[in-house]
Amino acid sequence: MAGVANAANISTATAYRYFPDAETIQIEAIIRNDAGRDDDYLVMCKEKVSVHQDPIERVVAVHNIMMEWVRRNEAGYRLFIAKRHERIATRQAPFENSDARNDRRLRMISLALEPIAKSLGDRIEEITLRIAAVIGPEPYFTLKDVCGVDDTTLDRLAEANLRQIVRSLV
């Protein structure tokens, strides 16, 4: 930590205030490598999603963005998920809820559903969570590792599932 703090021109105490250990820094680096700082990922996501009018296509676009990140840095995302599970399993505090990375998926899905959000009314939260349950690295790793599914089949299955889910909810 002292070396990292020195390289960043901050005190070791300041480094520990934001990053309790070296693993937390690694995880932050993984996330920022793909999505950039703060809300940069939303700007990029909006550019890619806004070309579509259909909410189904917009949700599929969000999924594709996330899969691009995961495939580009699969080991990093595995580490991120493993550390999160380790903290929960050992009853340590999980990553801070206020941390932007915890709601990145939800914010991206909300962006995809934005054109129809008013028509969904108070169902928007549940719909967002249902979609969140099937996109991202966790289902990817489950299908790949547990079920032995190749990337081409995985992409086909994920897209078909997302289309069906969004069609049935909206």
Image (tube, rainbow, N blue to C red):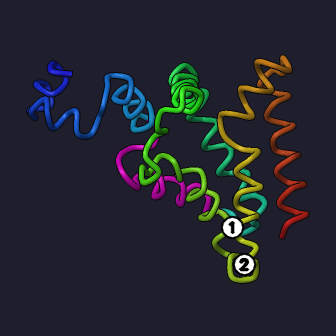
Residue drawn at 51 percent across, 30 percent down: 87
Residue 29 visible to an observer of this rendering: yes
Q: CA distance from mark 2 to mark 1?
A: 7 Å
- Please, is residue 144 above or below residue 67 in the view? above
Q: Quadrant of the C terminus?
A: bottom right
What span is colored magenta in the figure?
Answer: 34-51
Residue drawn at 65 percent across, 63 percent down: 112
Residue drawn at 70 percent across, 61 percent down: 128
Q: Amino acid at mark 1?
A: Glu
Q: Residues within 10 Å of mark 2 (few under 14, many from 20)?
A: few
Q: Secondary structure at mark 2?
A: helix
Residue 92 relative to residue 162: left or right: left
- Please, is residue 143 above or below residue 100 in the view? above
Q: Is label 2 in contact with label 1 (beta carbons under 8 Å)?
A: yes
Residue 43 relative to residue 118: left or right: left
Q: Quadrant of the N terminus?
A: top left
Residue drawn at 75 percent across, 54 percent down: 131
Q: Secondary structure at mark 1?
A: helix
- In the rendering, which numbered label is found on residue 125? 1
Mark 2 lies on residue:
122
Q: Quadrant of residue 31?
A: top left
Find residue 23 and report its horizontal and vertical position in percent: 38, 23
- Magenta highlight on residue 95: no
- Magenta highlight on residue 44: yes
Residue 73 visible to an observer of this rendering: no
Find residue 153 and report its horizontal and vertical position in percent: 85, 28
Q: Amino acid at mark 2?
A: Asp
- Please, is residue 119 above or below residue 56 in the view? below
